[in-house]
């Protein structure tokens, strides 16, 4: 077999295996594509799959000194930033994570689909949220 034929057969076998284990989905609309890299020694074994993007997220993280600072961030973000975002078309939600052991604070916002995310990136709401995030940076250490 030629390297390209071997790569095609391995790609199909890999896809069939992933489908049988429930790790991949197959549909005509969103087909999974696989390609294999070839190095100087022949078959390289590197796979690349085209993955459909349904939601796009932006996140920010920082360290805080204590739990009280995390509460200040919560109040700032929930009272000032969230009202500007929640009514945007395609807004998927906001999620906050806080580790009390390491004092890690993370916030994630998501949008349904690329078009909604692009609309956010060019929106007036984003320009209103950026100063709030700058204020939040002052609380972080």
Image (cartoon, grey):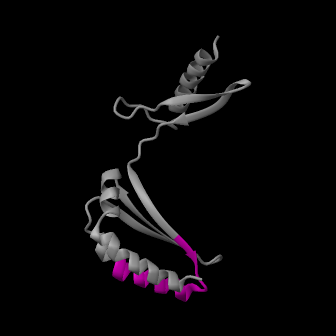
What residue is drawn where x is 43% and y is 59%? 57
Is residue 63 rendered magenta in the image?
Answer: yes
What residue is drawn where x is 36% and y is 64%? 93
* Residue 46: percent from left, percent from top: 63, 33
Q: Main secondary structure of the magenta part?
A: helix
- Relative to the observer, which residue lies in front, 23 or 124? 124
Mark count: 0
Taking 110 as reference, is 45 above or below it? Answer: above
Q: Furthest-bottom residue in view?
A: 68
Q: Describe residue 133's horizontal placement relative to residue 2 as left or right.
A: left
Using the rendered image of the protein, determine whether residue 121 is visible from the camera's viewpoint. yes
Is residue 124 rendered magenta in the image?
Answer: no
Q: In the rendered structure, which segment of residues is drawn in magenta?
A: 61-81
What residue is drawn where x is 26% and y is 65%? 88
* Residue 128: percent from left, percent from top: 32, 76
* Residue 99: percent from left, percent from top: 59, 74
């Amino acid at each position: 077999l030629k390297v390209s034929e071997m790569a095609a057969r391995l790609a199909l076998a890999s896809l069939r295996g992933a489908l049988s284990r429930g790790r991949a989905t197959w549909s005509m609309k969103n087909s999974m594509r696989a390609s294999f890299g070839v190095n100087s020694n022949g078959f390289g074994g590197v796979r690349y799959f085209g993955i459909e993007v349904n939601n796009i997220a932006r996140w920010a993280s920082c360290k805080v000194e204590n739990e009280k600072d995390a509460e200040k961030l919560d109040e700032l973000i929930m009272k000032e930033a969230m009202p500007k975002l929640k009514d945007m078309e395609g807004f998927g939600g906001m999620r906050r994570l806080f580790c009390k052991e390491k004092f890690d604070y993370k916030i994630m916002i998501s949008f349904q689909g690329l078009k909604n995310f692009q609309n956010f990136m060019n929106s007036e709401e984003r320009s209103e949220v950026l100063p709030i995030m700058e204020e939040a940076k002052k609380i972080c250490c």
